[in-house]
């Protein structure tokens, strides 16, 4: 393998040098327990408070509204379960979500259905945008929480979160958004964005795996997901992962500072889209413009996405066929199927996710390598042979 191009940043990102340097003192000097009542503990507590305040500044919210978790999946579970259990006492036993959510949301909702809750899975249009009319019909006075992701992790479509939140609030329901993919791609101002809860995962923005957060707006009360000590105001117990929390704070600051660089990323994204959709029998999955800056999801008929992934890997290019959390499944993407993509076509999609760290030369290399791979795989397909014969 002579070349290496990492273009699977929606799955995870490498920990940045700035983040590693920010975390280093927590391993060598500030290693105390923030709950300990002595000088070493106070030192750690001060660093913890500072990281929380810096994160709050990034999102323009109060430090007291930030709760640290282990990952985005935990945050999603806590938000939905916590809101549902709390609202059940008031007779609200209904949850609304979309058909294209991350499995951390969908599987949580399925589990809650077994506990007596009802769930409505709102559909999306061909571009992956939630159908607002359908959402309005779904939300009732029985709805406890509306859970709609900020941006889709597979096709990159950005949802109209403000309108969705207004629909939820009009019925007295809480609004939760999984913003794992949106953070670093969208400037999120929680003073203006009318959501009650929002989840973040560190490893999508060059922080380590194993750290996330849940924003809970002041005045919103949800049940705990786990029980234990007094950390995180007794809402999320467990000794705080100080090094990773500090790393998350740094990663969020860097991501916000680099938002102006997204114009360059969008140009590379659009160049990829234009080049790859010139291949016959190809299509762009997701919205053409209302999509994440670095997301390219293109489907190719008559071939399997897994085969493309393997050939690209041989060429030194790392991409994926969809969510890394379902990569072991051979089923077609539930996101693409919900968008109306035929089952047999949904198998032939590839997701390329780039960041500011990718270069124009790397984009050139992907454009150079992918078309002949598609051609090679099609020439091996009996379905393609029929197309050629009937051309």
Image (spheres, helix red, strand yellow):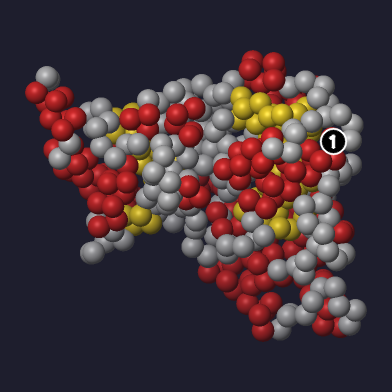
Q: Nearer the viewer, residue 174 or 354?
A: 174
- Please give left or right for residue 15 compared with residue 198 in the image: left
* Residue 40 image-quadrant placement: bottom right
Residue shown at 53% from the left, 69% from the top: 17
Q: Is residue 26 visible?
A: yes
Residue shown at 67% from the left, 84% from the top: 28
Q: Residue 45: x percent and y percent?
A: 82, 71
Q: Nearer the viewer, residue 115 or 7?
A: 115
Toward the left, the furthest residue is 389
Label 1 crowd (10 A; few <14 / some 14-19 / many >=20):
many
Question: Dividing the image into 4 quarters, which one contains the N terminus?
Answer: bottom left
Which residue position holds label 1?
87
- Please give left or right for residue 61 compared with residue 186 in the image: right
Residue shown at 41% from the left, 36% from the top: 332
Q: Is residue 274 visible?
A: no
Q: Residue 385: x percent and y percent?
A: 12, 30
Q: Nearer the viewer, residue 243 or 84?
A: 84
Rendered view: 275 above or below 11: above
Q: Nearer the viewer, residue 299 or 105?
A: 105
Rendered view: 21 above or below 328: below
Q: Secondary structure at mark 1?
A: helix
- Please give left or right for residue 278 compared with residue 249 in the image: left
Q: Residue 224: x percent and y percent?
A: 82, 51
């Amino acid at each position: 393998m002579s070349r290496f191009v990492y273009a699977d940043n929606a799955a995870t990102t490498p920990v940045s040098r700035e983040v590693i340097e920010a975390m280093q003192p927590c391993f060598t000097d500030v290693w105390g327990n923030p709950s300990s009542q002595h000088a070493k503990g106070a030192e750690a507590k001060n660093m913890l408070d500072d990281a929380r305040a810096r994160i709050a500044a990034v999102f323009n919210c109060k430090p007291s509204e930030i709760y640290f978790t282990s990952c985005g999946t935990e945050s999603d579970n806590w938000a939905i379960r916590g809101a549902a259990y709390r609202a059940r006492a008031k007779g609200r036993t209904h949850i609304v979500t979309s058909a294209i959510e991350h499995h951390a949301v969908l599987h949580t909702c399925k589990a809650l259905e077994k506990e007596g809750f009802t769930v409505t899975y709102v559909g999306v249009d061909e571009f992956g945008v939630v159908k607002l009319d359908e959402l309005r019909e779904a939300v009732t006075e029985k709805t406890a929480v509306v859970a709609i992701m900020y941006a889709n992790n597979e096709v990159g479509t950005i949802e109209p979160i403000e309108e969705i939140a207004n629909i939820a609030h009009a019925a007295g329901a809480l609004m939760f958004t999984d913003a794992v993919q949106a953070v670093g791609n969208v400037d999120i101002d929680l003073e203006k964005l009318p959501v009650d809860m929002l989840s973040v995962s560190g490893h999508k923005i060059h922080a380590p795996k194993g750290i996330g957060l849940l924003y809970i707006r002041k005045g919103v009360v949800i049940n705990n997901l786990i029980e234990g000590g007094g950390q995180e105001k007794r809402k999320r117990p467990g000794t705080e992962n100080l090094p990773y929390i500090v790393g998350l704070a740094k990663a969020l600051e860097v991501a916000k500072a680099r938002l102006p660089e997204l114009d360059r990323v969008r140009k590379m994204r659009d160049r990829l889209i234009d080049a790859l959709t010139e291949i016959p029998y190809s299509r762009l999955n997701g919205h053409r413009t209302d999509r994440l800056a670095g997301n390219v999801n293109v489907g190719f008929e008559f071939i399997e996405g897994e085969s493309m992934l393997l050939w690209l890997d041989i060429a030194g290019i790392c991409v994926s066929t969809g969510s890394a959390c379902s990569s072991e499944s051979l089923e077609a993407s539930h996101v693409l199927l919900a968008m109306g993509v035929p089952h047999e076509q949904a198998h032939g999609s590839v997701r390329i996710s780039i960041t500011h760290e990718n270069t124009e030369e790397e984009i050139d290399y992907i454009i150079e390598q992918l078309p002949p791979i598609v051609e090679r795989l099609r020439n091996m397909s009996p379905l393609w042979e029929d197309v050629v014969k009937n051309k």
